[in-house]
């Protein structure tokens, strides 16, 4: 039977892997990244292999991790004589020690929030966690019929990790911690990149501060989303690409491929952010290895494709495309790619995306930023809400200020990035720092590709998180060039103070205040954003479980918080209850028979659909229970 303590098995495997790499590499931070990538590959392999025969069960997952942990321990024992020696503790200044202590407190507070708070983010309840419970029920990650197609075609690695933790524990207590672990890994990786760029210990310390205080990063790190997870894999990609410049060994080449594969399997935005680093990797391989360059490039490419093979195959089978994009460019319910590509529309997207980062708590100042943006568009001769470059149903404008994982602004970090970029370019005129400049170009080009390809959305700020994380070593490197250590420390202190509202007063998961996660019940936390659904959802589930219904259908809109129903079904601890989407009208309806014939005795309805989906010819009309926004139909 599942127990929270069993989560320690995959974590033990990770720890043993870190120690194995430490003996080979002699660096804690690089060993952490190498182990993270290895663990990510192993988790993907376990998930995909067990899914084929539908053995993705508690026993299958636990047994796989036990075997993996023993294998990691055997590897550790086998290389005990090859140890390079543990790295010596760094001699940090008192200021650096104090700053790192503040970073540790900040990250720990975010981790506490992630562990205590219920995963109540909009996307988490709609598809991140909903797809996990369907996989657990189906014993496979194969596609299934659903009204919410994002549960299928979206890249699934973050949810794979949640799936394993959820199966080995007693529920979703660990769901938010996947993002938090990614935050920790990103901070460590960013400081390692700073060292690769030439930053001293003070610069590496400042990198930790800059990365740990990104408002959007803090907000994301306590959710069950995937923006920080993809940021971590991109940090790994950047590290291995940088390492390949100095040492063309197999580990660095394979690290590029593995990191790329895991990033692509986590979020589609990784394609845009990764392209410049891949070009850098390719150019450096050709320049150094000449005719032998094909070997590391081919190995990296095969590894990246292998990691995504399962998900690509499922998308191809249903949508005819490995990305789940149909022939008309539509992905799921929306067209995300720009419909026109020109210099004015490109500049428009760059300006509008930068505006999202510059927002402040001041409505007057935000109105000025919007007005300036509209003036730029008037000069360009482009509408700021051009439907060809703006997501359907939205218009350009800065969202209302909120300490939120969807709309948080990052103005201080954005200004520091612009200032650091100017400093780096100015410095390159006198002493060309080739590697830092090339790295800066890769990160900047990734952001520009993002703006070039994707339609503007009001919640793009969270999709910029990988750029903000990857830019943090550049910002810290520029700060370390300031001769006055007190001035650089003052900037770091400003960042730490400015981050406090995001650490303590998240809109959905506050640590303090009248709605604190310590004083609000976990079940109520799920409904913080939709309190009007708490009563109807609970009553609907109680009614059906009391009546003894074992086959229950869901008839939902494409953007409804499905997981809220599962919360109550899980609390009822009813065994042998099967829950499936019914009346599905999209392509996923083709998967209706994949897991056996399903004939529900009752259906829960939520959303704009009309009528009920269980009327059968010759049968009496089902009885209906109306609970406000939730309706329940029961076959007589």
Image: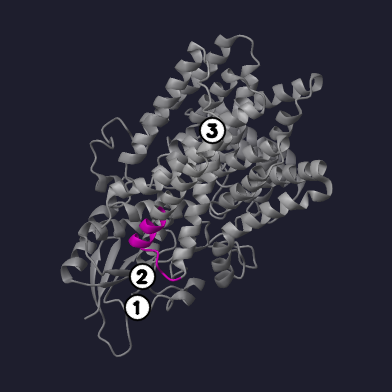
Viewer-proximal residue, 87 or 308?
Answer: 87
Whether the residues at callouts 1 and 2 have beta carbons within 8 Å, the answer is yes
Q: Position of residue 247 (x, y in %)?
A: 71, 37
Q: Give the distance between the C-alpha atoms of the residues marked 1 and 2, in whole angstroms.
A: 8 Å
Residue 241: quarter of image: top right
Residue denoted by label 3: 29
Q: Residue 580 has which mark?
A: 2
Q: Residue at x 28, y 35 (%)?
A: 516
Judge whether residue 357 can be spotted in this image: no
Viewer-proximal residue, 530 or 233?
Answer: 233
Q: Residue at x 58, y 19 (%)?
A: 201
Q: Give the distance between the C-alpha atoms of the residues marked 2 and 3, in whole angstroms.
A: 44 Å
Left-right relation of 289 to 502: right
The quarter of the image holding the N terminus is: bottom left
Extreme residue in the bottom direction? 618
Extreme residue in the left direction? 546
Left-right relation of 430 to 30: right
Viewer-proximal residue, 149 or 387?
Answer: 149
Q: Position of residue 296 (x, y in %)?
A: 71, 49
Judge whether residue 68 can be spotted in this image: yes
Q: Please tell me which of labels 1 and 2 falls first in the chain.
A: 2
Q: Position of residue 78 (x, y in %)?
A: 50, 44
Q: Residue at x 46, y 47 (%)?
A: 74
Q: Please tell me which of labels 2 and 3 falls first in the chain.
A: 3
Q: Residue 66 has which mark?
A: none
Whether the residues at callouts 2 and 3 have beta carbons within 8 Å, the answer is no
Name the mark nearer the viewer: 3 or 1: 3
Q: Is residue 402 magenta?
A: no
- Please tell me how crowded label 3 is: few (under 14), some (14-19), or many (20+) other residues with Cα within 10 Å: many
Regarding mark 1 in the picture, which secondary structure is present there?
loop
In the image, which residues are magenta? 53-65
Residue denoted by label 1: 598
């Amino acid at each position: 039977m599942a127990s929270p303590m069993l989560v320690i098995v995959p974590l033990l495997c990770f720890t043993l892997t870190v120690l194995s790499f430490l003996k080979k590499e002699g660096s804690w931070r690089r060993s952490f990244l190498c182990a993270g990538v290895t663990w990510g590959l192993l988790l993907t392999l376990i998930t995909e292999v067990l899914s084929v025969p539908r053995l993705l069960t508690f026993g299958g997952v636990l047994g796989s991790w036990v075997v993996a942990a023993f294998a990691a321990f055997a590897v550790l024992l086998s290389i005990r004589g090859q140890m390079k020696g543990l790295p010596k503790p760094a001699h940090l200044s008192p200021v650096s020690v104090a700053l790192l202590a503040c970073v540790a407190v900040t990250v720990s507070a975010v981790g506490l929030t992630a562990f205590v708070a219920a995963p109540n983010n909009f996307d988490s309840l709609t598809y991140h966690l909903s797809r996990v419970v369907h996989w657990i029920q189906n014993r496979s990650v194969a596609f299934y019929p659903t009204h919410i197609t994002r549960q299928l075609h979206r890249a699934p690695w973050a949810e794979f990790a949640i799936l394993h933790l959820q199966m080995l524990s007693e529920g979703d207590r660990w769901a938010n911690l996947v993002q938090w672990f990614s935050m920790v890994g990103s901070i460590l990786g960013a400081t390692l990149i700073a060292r690769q760029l030439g930053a001293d210990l003070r610069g590496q310390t400042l990198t930790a501060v800059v990365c740990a205080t990104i408002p959007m990063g803090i907000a994301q790190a306590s959710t069950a989303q995937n923006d920080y997870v993809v940021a971590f894999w991109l940090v790994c990609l950047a590290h291995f690409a940088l390492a390949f410049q100095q040492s063309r060994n197999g580990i660095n080449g394979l690290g590029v491929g593995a990191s790329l594969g895991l990033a692509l399997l986590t979020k589609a935005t990784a394609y845009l952010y990764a392209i410049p680093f891949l070009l850098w990797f390719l150019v450096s391989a050709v320049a150094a290895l000449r005719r032998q360059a094909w070997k590391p490039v081919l190995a990296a490419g095969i590894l990246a494709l292998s990691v995504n093979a399962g998900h690509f195959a499922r998308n191809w089978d249903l949508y005819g495309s490995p990305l789940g994009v149909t022939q008309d460019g539509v992905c799921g319910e929306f067209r995300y790619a720009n419909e026109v590509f020109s210099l004015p529309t490109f500049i428009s997207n760059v300006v509008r995306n930068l505006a999202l980062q510059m927002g402040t708590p001041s409505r007057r100042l935000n109105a000025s930023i919007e007005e300036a943006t509209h003036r730029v568009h008037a000069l360009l001769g482009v509408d700021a809400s051009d439907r060809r470059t703006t997501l359907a149903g939205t218009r350009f404008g800065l969202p209302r200020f909120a300490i939120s994982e969807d709309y948080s602004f990052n103005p201080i970090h954005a200004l520091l990035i612009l200032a650091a970029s100017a400093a780096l370019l100015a410095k390159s005129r006198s002493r060309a720092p080739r590697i830092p400049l090339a790295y800066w170009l890769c990160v900047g080009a990734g952001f520009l590709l993002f703006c070039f390809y994707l339609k503007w959305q009001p919640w793009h700020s969270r999709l910029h998180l990988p750029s903000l994380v990857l830019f943090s070593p550049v910002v810290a490197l520029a700060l370390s060039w300031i001769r006055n250590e007190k001035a650089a420390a003052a900037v770091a202190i400003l960042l730490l103070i400015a981050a406090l509202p995001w650490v303590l007063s998240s809109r959905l998961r506050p640590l303090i205040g009248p709605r604190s996660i310590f004083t609000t019940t976990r079940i109520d936390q799920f409904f913080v954003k939709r309190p009007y659904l708490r009563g109807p959802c609970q009553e609907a589930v109680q009614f059906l479980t009391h009546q003894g219904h074992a086959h229950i259908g869901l008839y939902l809109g494409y953007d409804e918080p499905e997981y809220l129903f599962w919360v109550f079904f899980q609390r009822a601890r009813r065994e042998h209850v099967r829950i499936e989407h019914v009346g599905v009208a999209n392509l996923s309806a083709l998967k209706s028979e994949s897991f056996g014939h399903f004939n529900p005795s009752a259906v829960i309805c939520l959303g704009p659909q009309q009528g009920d989906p269980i009327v059968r010819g010759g049968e009496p009309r089902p009885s209906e229970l109306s609970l406000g926004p939730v309706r329940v139909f029961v076959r007589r």
